[in-house]
Image (cartoon, rainbow, N blue to C red):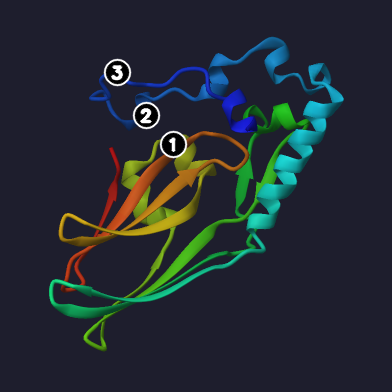
């Protein structure tokens, strides 16, 4: 898909220098690789479709309502993930030039979570990008959105995984919300 056009180098080395040491893939691209005039008509059509497909995400709401047994108790998890339609995310040209755009204005996303244990509410929380701020570099903090919730039970906890990603790019980071059987919430970054 188009996302592979952005990938130049994966950082598999030591990341002990800090979260802001990771390089943006756009900094490694140059010349015609970012020149929309050099793209063929087919590529231009694919890129326009990719932009439109991204915009359609703002119209889709993800609803999860499930009941499960966990450590001998009955749990009901209700998660609604949706677009805020707030025009709060301004993606700069360094990420959008390949699409022939000077910039891209889009919206933040949010999840509303309700967790009941044996019919008693133990978690009622909204989840947004700011909850993961300490796990994000400056580019993801400034231009990223919370996407693709995935619910799983791991390590005796309920986990909700997300990708905080810069729209129209492959720049992103996996993050998660961990919830124990009593409703204690821990925000973290996946490795």
Label number found at residue 38:
none
Q: Could you tell me which secondary element the residue under label 3 belongs to?
A: loop
Q: Nearer the viewer, mark 3 or mark 1?
A: 3
Furthest-right residue in this view: 41
The earlier-in-sequence mark between 2 and 1 is: 2
189 or 88: nearer the viewer: 189
The earlier-in-sequence mark between 3 and 1 is: 3
Give me the C-alpha separation between circle 3 and circle 1.
Answer: 20 Å
The earlier-in-sequence mark between 3 and 2 is: 3
Relative to 19, residue 141 above or below: below
Q: Name the residue under label 3.
A: 13
Residue 186 at x, y percent in the picture: 23, 58
Relative to 169, residue 141 above or below: below
Q: Name the residue under label 2.
A: 20
Is there a contact, CB below 8 Å, between mark 2 and mark 1? yes
Give me the C-alpha separation between circle 3 and circle 2.
Answer: 14 Å
Q: Could you tell me which secondary element the residue under label 1 belongs to?
A: helix
For the point 76% across and 42% down, the residue is 49
Residue 50 at x, y percent in the picture: 70, 41
18 or 171: nearer the viewer: 171
Query: Does residue 45 appear left or right of residue 190 in this picture?
Result: right
Residue 33 at x, y percent in the picture: 68, 16
For the point 45% across and 66% down, the residue is 111
Residue 118 falls in which quadrant of the image? bottom left
Relative to 50, residue 119 above or below: below
Relative to 154, residue 26 above or below: above
Q: Mark 1 points at which residue?
A: 138
Quadrant holding the C terminus: top left
Residue 157 at x, y percent in the picture: 20, 61
Give me the C-alpha separation between circle 2 and circle 1.
Answer: 7 Å
User: Tag 1: Cα neighbours inside 10 Å, few (<14), some, or many (≥20)?
Assistant: few
């Amino acid at each position: 898909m188009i996302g592979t056009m952005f990938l130049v180098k994966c950082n598999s080395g030591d990341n002990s220098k800090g979260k802001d040491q990771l390089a943006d893939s756009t900094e490694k691209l140059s010349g015609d690789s970012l020149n929309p005039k050099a793209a063929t008509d087919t590529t231009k059509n694919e890129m326009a479709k990719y932009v439109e497909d991204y915009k359609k995400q703002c119209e889709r709401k993800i609803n999860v309502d499930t009941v499960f047994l966990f450590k001998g108790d009955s749990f009901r998890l209700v998660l609604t993930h949706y677009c805020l339609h707030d025009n709060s995310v301004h993606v700069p040209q360094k990420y959008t030039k390949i699409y022939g755009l000077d910039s891209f204005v889009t919206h933040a996303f949010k999840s509303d979570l309700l967790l009941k244990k044996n019919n008693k509410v133990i978690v009622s929380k909204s989840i947004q990008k700011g909850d993961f701020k300490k796990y994000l570099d400056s580019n993801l903090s400034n231009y990223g959105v919370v996407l693709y919730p995935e619910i799983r039970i791991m390590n005796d906890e309920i986990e909700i995984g997300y990708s905080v990603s810069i729209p129209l790019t492959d720049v992103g980071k996996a993050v998660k919300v961990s919830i124990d059987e009593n409703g204690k919430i821990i925000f973290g970054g996946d490795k």
